[in-house]
Image (tube, helix red, strand yellow):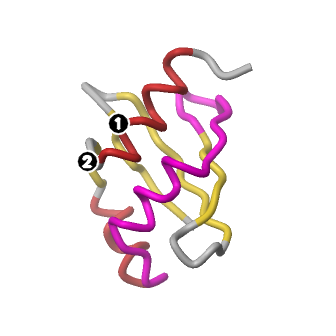
Amino acid sequence: MTTLQEQVILLRLKLGQFTLSRHARQRMQERLVTHEDLFALGRTGHCSVTEGGRWTIIGQDLSGDSLTAIVAWKAGVFVVTLY
């Protein structure tokens, strides 16, 4: 079952209400991931809690390819990295 916080994280991704770390921006550039791909991840993704108060989101990008993001909650959604 998805918690309220997980639902909020996915909603904020879907709506583009997130901040990217420098590392995440580098990974996006390397992997040709767009902001629209992250919006799609918010629509298709499933959240699970990981160590250190972070969440792993696994879903699909706009092309239907697998996309995973690690996010932290810091005054909203903060995308730490993606692959």
- Considering the numbered disc 2 on the image, is that residue within a helix, a strand or a loop? strand
Instruction: Report the residue at 43% width, 26% height from top.
Output: 8
Instruction: Report the residue at 54% width, 68% height from top.
Output: 61
Q: Which residue bears the numbered disc 2? A: 19
| Mark drawn on residue 14 | none
Q: Residues within 10 Å of mark 2 (few under 14, many from 20)?
A: some
CB within 8 Å, label 2 to label 1: yes
Is residue 19 covered in magenta? no
Instruction: Report the residue at 31% width, 68% height from top.
Output: 25
Residue 36's place in the image compared with 16, above or below, is below
- Locate residue 6, reporting x and y percent: 54, 26
- Locate residue 68, reporting x and y percent: 60, 58
What segment carries the magenta color?
Answer: 31-55
Residue 56's place in the image compared with 82, above or below, is above
Q: Where, quadrant-wise, is the C terminus in this rendering?
A: bottom right
In the image: residue 49, left or right of residue 37: right
In the image: residue 20, left or right of residue 3: left
In the image, 70 versus 43, the foreground residue is 43
- Quarter of the image for residue 9 reads top left
Q: Amino acid at mark 1?
A: Val
List the single residue furthest toward the top.
Answer: 4
Q: Which residue bears the numbered disc 1? A: 77
- Considering the numbered disc 1 on the image, is that residue within a helix, a strand or a loop? strand
